[in-house]
Image: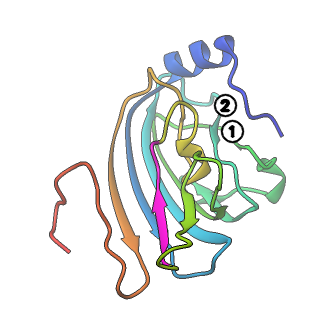
């Protein structure tokens, strides 16, 4: 598994990938150690036929398709999902299992010893978004995204942006 993006990889990918839009769904009701993450990434490729990769760190990718074609299990190495034969316009769908983190990276889960309740937060500091969902995780590849969260009953979900639809 390779986690660190090199300068050359970032430069090459920035010349290749553009107009990125993510639709991300996370389900926080699946357990105390892991959650499910589903990503649909629409993006353009400057050189049809080229290859690149998208980052995701997690225990497993259950299923991934690129432009309707299932990707083989071998395309995921635990940190990257290889994307070969890109078209000019692409749709990548990734269904995966992600882990809660306890060190402030990714999606951090904490049980308050005073009230016994669970709290989650994320700052998605550099190079941590791909611990929650599959993404081209480099600062110069800007994207728009939609995020939906399924949370246990009684939980409050807060974001630093205005929701498209109030909960």
Where's the N terminus, which quadrant? Answer: top right
- The question of residue 154 being in magenta is answered with no
At which x and y percent is residue 23?
38, 56
Part of the protein shown in magenta: 117-123
Residue at 19%, 60% in the rendered image? 163
Q: In this view, does 15 lie above or below 111?
A: above
> What is the crowding at mark 2: few (fewer than 14 residues within 10 Å), some, or many (at least 20)?
some
> In the rendered image, which residue does mark 1 sit on?
84
- Res. 123 image quadrant: top left
Q: Residue at x 51, y 16 (%)?
A: 15
Is the residue under label 1 in contact with that under label 2 (CB below 8 Å)? Answer: yes
Q: What residue did someone put label 2 on?
A: 51
Percent of width and height locating residue 40: 46, 56
* 44 is higher (above) or lower (below) than 159: above
The vertical placement of 11 against 108, above or below, is: above
**Based on the displayed image, in which of its 4 quarters is residue 83 positioned?**
top right
User: In the figure, is residue 19 to the left or right of 58?
Assistant: left
């Amino acid at each position: 598994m390779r986690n660190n993006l090199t300068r050359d990889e970032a430069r090459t990918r920035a010349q290749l990938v553009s107009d990125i839009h993510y639709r991300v769904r996370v389900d926080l009701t699946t357990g105390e150690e892991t959650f499910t993450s589903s990503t649909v990434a629409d993006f353009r490729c400057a050189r049809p036929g080229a290859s690149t990769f998208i980052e995701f760190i997690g225990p497993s990718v259950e299923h991934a398709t690129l432009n309707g074609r299932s990707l083989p299990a071998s395309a995921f190495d635990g940190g990257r999902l290889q994307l070969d034969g890109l078209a000019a316009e692409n749709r990548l769908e990734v269904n995966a299992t992600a882990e809660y983190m306890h060190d402030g990276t990714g999606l951090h889960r904490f049980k308050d010893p005073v009230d016994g309740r669970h709290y989650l937060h994320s700052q998605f500091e550099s190079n941590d978004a791909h611990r929650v969902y599959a993404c081209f995780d480099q600062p110069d590849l800007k994207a728009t995204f939609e995020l939906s969260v399924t949370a246990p009953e009684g939980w409050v979900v807060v974001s630093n942006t205005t929701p498209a639809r109030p909960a």
